[in-house]
Amino acid sequence: MILLVIIAICITVFGIFRVQDIALKKLFPKEYSEYVERYAREYNIDPLLIYSVIKAESNFNPEAMSNMS
């Protein structure tokens, strides 16, 4: 939980300094941007938060599977 708070604070700082576009282009694969941008707008969520969750959960590996145990 503390990690999520730290991530949220970092994302907010990025937004304040307007490096969001640079971060998206440098850190995250472009093939996901269509979905991330669309759903970020639809649900009013910072796209960097979505990218950060994808990065943490699967590192953008389309073959990644959740541990169901």
Image (cartoon, grey):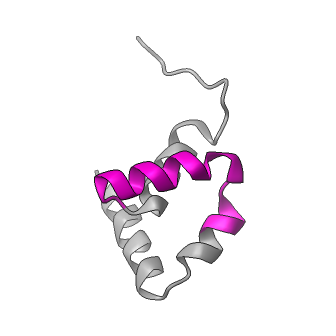
Does the magenta segment cover residue 37? yes
Residue positioned 37% across, 75% down in the render: 12
The structure residue drawn at horizontal position 71% and vertical position 67%, both measured from the top left corner, is 26
3 relative to 28 in the view: left or right: left
Quadrant of the drawing holding the C terminus: top left
Q: Position of residue 33 (x, y in %)?
A: 60, 53
Please state which of residues 29 and 35 is positioned toward the viewer in this rendering.
35
Highlighted range, magenta: 24-45
Task: Name the foreground residue: 7 vs 19.
Answer: 19
In the image, what residue occupies the spot 53% across and 45% down? 35
Describe residue 43's horizontal placement relative to residue 67 as left or right: left
Task: Tell me the chief SS of the magenta region.
Answer: helix
Residue 24 visible in rendering: yes
The relative height of residue 14 versus residue 17 in the rendered view (above or below) is: above
Nearest the camera: 34 or 7? 34
- Which residue of the protein is positioned furthest toward the top in this rendering? 69
Q: Position of residue 22 (x, y in %)?
A: 64, 76
Q: Is 55 contained in the magenta span?
A: no
Q: Nearer the viewer, residue 33 or 18?
A: 33
Q: Residue at x 67, y 62 (%)?
A: 27
Residue 45 position in % (x across, y down): 34, 58
**Residue 31, relative to residue 69: is it above or below?**
below
Q: Is residue 3 visible?
A: no
Residue 28 left/right relative to 40 = right
Res 10 quadrant in image? bottom left
Left or right: residue 5 compared with residue 47: left
